[in-house]
Amino acid sequence: MKNHGETSIDTIGRIMDRLGDQVFAEGVMPAPNLWTDDLQIVERDCPVCGALFVGLRTAVYAALAQHDFGHRHDEARQAMQEVMGGA
């Protein structure tokens, strides 16, 4: 699905059409300074906590990678606390 003339307003409209105004208003839509000729809108969820990420494919994958990093950081901190005896 390629559309070189689509603006960010058009893209946001497509996301709102897919998700509905209510869900869009409650979430955060990152606005990366990125150009791509592939405007795929995807849904991905976190296998750890089930958080749902919806938006442009590149933005969703970037946000999910950061989210996963946070989970791994939390796991490492918890493991360290167990080793240190809760200190």
Image (cartoon, helix red, strand yellow):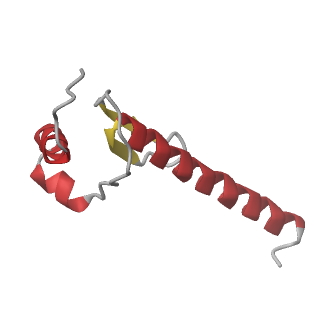
In terms of depth relative to the viewer, which is nearer, 63 or 79? 63
- Quadrant including the N terminus: top left
Q: In which quarter of the image is residue 83?
A: bottom right
x and y percentages locating residue 63 in the rendered image: 46, 49
Q: In which quarter of the image is residue 22?
A: bottom left
Q: In which quarter of the image is residue 43?
A: top left
Instruction: Count the numbered circles shown.
Output: 0
71 lies left or right of 47? right
Residue at the extreme right of the image, as rendered: 84
x and y percentages locating residue 70 in the rendered image: 60, 57
18 lies left or right of 86? left
65 lies left or right of 2? right
What residue is drawn where x is 16% and y is 35%?
6
Please tell me whether residue 78 is drawn above or below residue 30 in the rendered image. Answer: below
Residue at the extreme bottom of the image, as rendered: 87
In terms of depth relative to the viewer, which is nearer, 9 or 25? 9
What residue is drawn where x is 83% and y is 79%?
87
Please tell me whether residue 3 is drawn above or below residue 78 in the rendered image. Answer: above
What residue is drawn where x is 12% and y is 46%?
20
What residue is drawn where x is 31% and y is 28%?
37
x and y percentages locating residue 62 in the rendered image: 48, 44
In terms of depth relative to the viewer, which is nearer, 10 or 71? 10
40 lies left or right of 75? left
